[in-house]
Image (cartoon, rainbow, N blue to C red):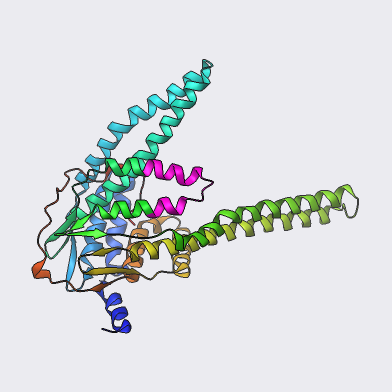
Amino acid sequence: MTDDDKAGDASDAFVFSGTWRDYLPIALANLALTIVTLGIYRFWAKARERRYLWSRTRFIDDRLEWTGTGTEMFVGFLIAVALFTPLFLVLRFGAQAMVLRGQTGPAALLSLLLYLLLAFAFGFARFRALRYRLSRSYWHGIRGGSDDPGLRYGLSATWKTAVGWLAFALLVPWAMTRLWNEQWSAMSFGPYRFRADVQARPLMGRWLALLFSPLLLVVAGSLAGFGIAASVAGGIDASPNAVAGAILIAVLTLLGIYLLFGLIGLFYYAAFQRAAIGSLSLGGIDFRFTARSRDWLLLFLGDIALVIGTLGLGICFLGYRHWSFLIRHLGAVGEVDPSEVTQSATHAPREAEGFADAFDLGAI
């Protein structure tokens, strides 16, 4: 098989056949019911949305099927709230009470424990959400999942994220790639385990560009401020129009630097997603992801235009847009014989991604 053939096969492996016209009644009903129920219906709305998106997604020769329910996700959310809310409140208000009593040392330690708890909860939630989604996703009657409860991943996410940022943020790509590999390597689909081996080194150039771009903000702001102060103090041109023009230039400069910072961040994020998904393999299948920075930029600009242009109503279409974007750029290369794929022996959790919903973690 030639490289051109492989590229063609990769792009044809996943196909999304949904249309916005078909999805419109689902989106509007979900939005209305979520508003009427003060947000409670969003769990059932998410389940209904996924049933539609999965059913319109074909992988090789069969469509995907979503079997999760809103009740599962709602119960998971309640469990998350019951477990973490009391502990969070104790640590939060306990630290404030210690500060008022002058016990700054113990208060600082308690605050540190609070942030570590939140970091662990975020990592734990992300792992459990992926495990649940795979366990409710079927292809040829076969599902995915994991027997790992996610506790080790939560601890790993806590210390790796801390190390990544405490080392002047230089090790953040290392933390992100290691955690991606750990999370996906604990998952399986049918009898096959996922393999992930994304490396941080190819991403470092883009990360360093992102990391040091705020220096441009500081330099530009300092130069603009110094120029204005020198012009006014020296009496070179202290007219109101000159001062207003200088301030306008300074503001536009700062906005330009912020825009540059966002674009560089998108530049890094796009590279990470291509490398991370491109490192995934399952059995004899290797995955590909082709979305580049320009594609992500158009997606986000389209989201903003949709939400603003519809006075907020378009937010109910974002899930559809993001799933369509994912499938459109997702590919796979390799061979798989559906007749040889057996059912997964992993445990299917009864409760869903309540932790992820509690922290508003996205599916993708």
Whether residue 90 sits left or right of residue 72 in the image: it is right
- Quarter of the image holding residue 270? bottom left
Residue ID at (29%, 49%): 33
State yes or no: residue 4 in magenta. no
**Residue 254 x %, y %:** 66, 55
- Answer with left or right where residue 82 lies relative to residue 340: right
Camera-side residue of 279 and 129: 279
**Res. 309 in view:** no
- The image quadrant that residue 27 belongs to is bottom left
Please identify the dominant SS of the magenta region: helix
Which x, y percent locates residue 154? 32, 42
Query: Residue placed at 40% from the left, 41% from the top?
Result: 159
Tell me the residue at 51%/15% (across/down): 101
Give above or below for 292 relative to 31.
below
Q: Is residue 172 visible?
A: yes
The residue shown at (44%, 26%) is 110
Q: Residue furthest top?
A: 101
- Magenta residue span: 157-177
Pick the residue in front: 364 or 34: 364
115 left or right, relative to 60:
right
State the quadrant of the N terminus: bottom left
- For the residue pair 48 and 111, the one nearer the viewer reads as 111
Horizontal and vertical percent position of residue 364: 34, 57
Which residue sits furthest right?
A: 235
**x and y percent of residue 132 in the render?**
22, 50
Callout count: 0
